[in-house]
Image: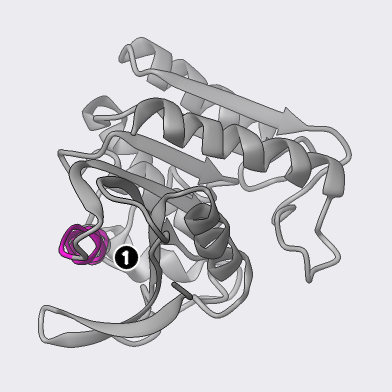
Amino acid sequence: MPGAYQTLSVGGSDMRSYVHLPEGVQDAPAVVVLHGTNGMDAGTEKAAVDRLAEEGIAAIVPDLFHRGLAERAEGSPRSGSMRAADFAADAQAALDHLRGSGVVAPERIGIMGFCMGGLVTYLVSGLVADLRAAVAFYPSYVFRPLGGGKDPSPFDVTGDIVCPLIIFAGEDDTHPSAEDLARMDAELTRHGKVHEIHTYPDTAHAFMSETSDSYREHAAKDAWPRSVAWLKRYL
C-alpha cells in the first residue's frame, strides 16, 4: 500500500505524520524515523520511510514541531529549547500507532533519525524502554542540555540506552565533529553498549539529502544498506 499522511494525537496536540506500511507482511518490524531541523517534509526522512517499507519494515515520520516551532537563538539548534519528555512522548505515540496497524510485531520496534532526529534518536534510546535497535545519522549537539537547560542532554542518558546503536557521520562534519564521535564512542564503550560508528571521507553534514549540495553518493550508498542490515539484525 502507498504511504499516506495521518494525524495522531499527543497530549492534546495533533501530530501530523507520514506512514508507510509494507504490503503482504505480517508481524513486520517497525521503525520511527525522526526528522532534522528542516521538518518532516524536507524529503530525506519521507524517502527513508518509503525505502524502509520496500524492505518490509513498517515506518512512520512524525512532525516533532507539532506543538509549535521552538525558539531558536542565532547559532543554536532549534532542538535546544525543546523538552526531552516531549520527544519521548512523540516517539512513543508514533510507535504505538504502528503497533496498532495490524501488521507490526509489537516487540520488533526501532528508531532512526537524521541531524536533529539523530540527536533525538540518541536521547530516546535511553528513554523508551522497549526499543530493539537505533540508527543515528549525523546526530548533532548531543552534549547540549535540552529544554533550555532544564533537561539532560542526550549524552547524559548514554548509560540508559537500551538497544544497539549505529551512528553514521562525515569526517568533515563539525556537528558531530571527530572529537564528538570519539567522546560518544568512549562513553558507549564504558557503559558496555553495543554500538558501531562509521565515518566517511570528503563528507560533511546531511550527506543523505539527495536534494541538497551536501549529498555525497559514496557515503549515502554505503550507509543506507548498513542501516537496513542493522535494523534487520536486531529487530
Residue under the image location 54 percent in, 64 percent down: 50
Name the quarter where the N terminus is drawn: bottom left
Residue under the image location 38 percent in, 42 percent down: 122
Residue under the image location 42 percent in, 61 percent down: 23
- Which one is in front, 201 or 98? 98
- Which one is in front, 116 or 215? 215
Q: Quadrant of residue 34?
A: bottom left
Q: Position of residue 225 (x, y in %)?
A: 64, 37
- Indicate whether 114 appears above or below 159: below
Residue under the image location 40 percent in, 39 percent down: 134
In this view of the protein, can residue 153 be seen by the observer? no
Q: Main secondary structure of the magenta part?
A: helix
The residue segment tinted magenta is: 89-100
Q: Quadrant of residue 227?
A: top right
- Which one is in front, 46 or 78? 46
Magenta stretch: includes residue 181: no
